[in-house]
Amino acid sequence: MNTGKEKPQSAQSSQVQHANDGPPRTHTAINRPPRNLKRYVSVFRIRLTYSLQYRTAALAGVATQFFWGFVLIMVYTAFYSASSSDPSISLPQLVTYVWLQQSFLAFVMLWFRDDELFRLITTGNIAYELCRPGDLYGFWYAKLLAQRMASALLRCFPIMIVASLLPQPYRMMLPASLVSAGLFIIALLLGLLVLVAISMFIYISVFYTMSPYGSLLMFTVIGEFLAGLIIPVPLMPDWLQDIVYLFPFGWTADFPFRVYAGHFGHTEALFGIMSQLIWLVALVTLGRQAMKKALRRVVVQGG
Amino acid sequence: MKLFLGYLSILFRSQMQYKTSFWLLTAGQFFIPFTTFAGIWFLFDRFGTLQGWEFYEVAICFAVIHMAFAISECFARGFDSFSSLVVSGDFDRLLVRPRSTVLQVLGSRFEFTRIGRLVQSLIVLIWAVVNVSLDWTPLKLITLILMVISGTVIFAGILILAATMCFWTVQGLEVVNILTNGGRELAQYPLQIYERWVVRLFTFVIPFGCINYLPLLYILGRTDGHDLLYALTPLAGLLFFIPCLFVWQFGVRHYRSTGS
């Protein structure tokens, strides 16, 4: 469900980046690992403060998300009320699941994109990017991560607070226990890291296709379905649920929310977190390889 | 009308210049509602019925609203991207031409790739109509066609209203998405399942209910009397369009160019 076209991040931020050009350059001589990391952290921080500027847009987003949350809950309530069969997830758990999805939409949505990076590749301005010291993959990764973080930080608190005060059946539950709350936070953050690693592939694919729309469309349609955005994964037929967990998408969004709702026990959650870690390492390694390959054959358009 | 067809053919030829991209996007548009539909199918697979509604009945609901949405996105795209006309000041040029502004904005853009979406919902509609168990009469078919037409008009009306706001805000407002995309998602299920206030809002203010829920009751033979009244409810969609046009005229009169 492509709710809307909220893309507060699409505005130019080139000034911010250029301002950032100075310090990292001096670091090139000393290429020690801690320094390297610091560079990405500063990219992350700048991008975060930059994206936090769009508070009004976020507010409008919150309103939209509430609308969606209500509609979805009403639909599921209607399905549950008439159902004779026993669904695998209880209605309050499902309601919580829906509100978490809405709160952390930025951690879930694949179409949440940075048009600026696409433009860099298609216009050939990628050349400047290549002149930067440090590794492009890490640089972009930090940037995309910060955007999603900022967007979620602005939205999740109002939604979660209001949703947990709503009357039944719309109320969002508190986490089952302190342990599951902790596991949820770990799973959510790991899920975010996996998601950004997946979305990096969209940007890398643009090196080959030169037009972001095709790959974006395919990634979104398939990825969002498998992440449980069209219908929650626990409501899918069993055979489909098995397929879902062969792909990384379910680990980004569906898994953390089910940990919160108590649909997964602690041991299951721990195993899940392990698989998230494995996916993360695999995707980042693959992504780095693909990026290196793409950059080797990159053609900088003149002009 | 001739002018409109002229616009149509020019834009079609220009979009066909990028054939591969065109077909890819069309295919993509085919798959977007496809996953949504698959979702509905899986839900019915698990739950059986939705408050007395069968799968094929909901499928008709889904198909009608998605067809209407696809057609309006295809033809009224000009209003959807209207803010760019205002921001760039290009709207001034439309004003000096001796034709109606509505026609010109309408003609400024068509999104032919939405045909993919249209084809998908058409397939669903035919599939559902064939499989749903009831006798079709000519009047029922006319009602069905009216539903699609009137739905298109409502979506177009909303897009025009949204575009009118650009006269004051310059930038488009994302909140409007609640009405277009949100309305679409909401009306793909029969309105009956929602809370009272939602039903009222989407029947009397924005008459989505009039284009699929109410006439569908007639088609399925669930009305108690007043058949003709239910059959003609889609016309309410046309009524919705008229004030939209007035608001647009009002907006045009208050237009101030951005100057650039």
Image (cartoon, coloured by chain):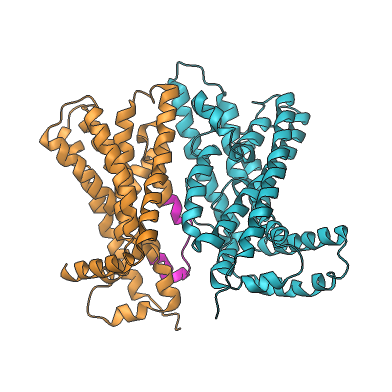
Q: Tell me the magenta residue range.
A: B164-179
User: Is residue B166 shown in magenta?
Assistant: yes
Q: x and y percent of residue B71 in the render?
A: 29, 53
The quadrant of the picture occupied by the C terminus of chain B is bottom left
- x 20%, y 67%: residue: B5
Q: Chain B is which colour?
A: orange
Residue B45 visible in the shown view: yes
Is residue A23 toward the left or the right of residue B125 in the image?
Answer: right
User: Is residue B254 shown in magenta?
Assistant: no
Q: Is residue B193 above or below residue A129?
A: above
Location of residue A207 (image quadrant): bottom right
Q: x and y percent of residue B169 in the render?
A: 47, 69
- In the rendered image, what is the letter of the chain coloured cyan? A
Q: Is residue B220 above or below residue B33?
A: above
Q: Nearer the viewer, residue B34 or B193?
A: B34
Is residue A170 toward the left or the right of residue A182 in the image?
Answer: left
Q: Nearer the viewer, residue A215 or B138?
A: A215
The quadrant of the picture occupied by the N terminus of chain B is bottom left
Q: Nearer the viewer, residue B150 or A248?
A: A248
- x 41%, y 65%: residue: B165
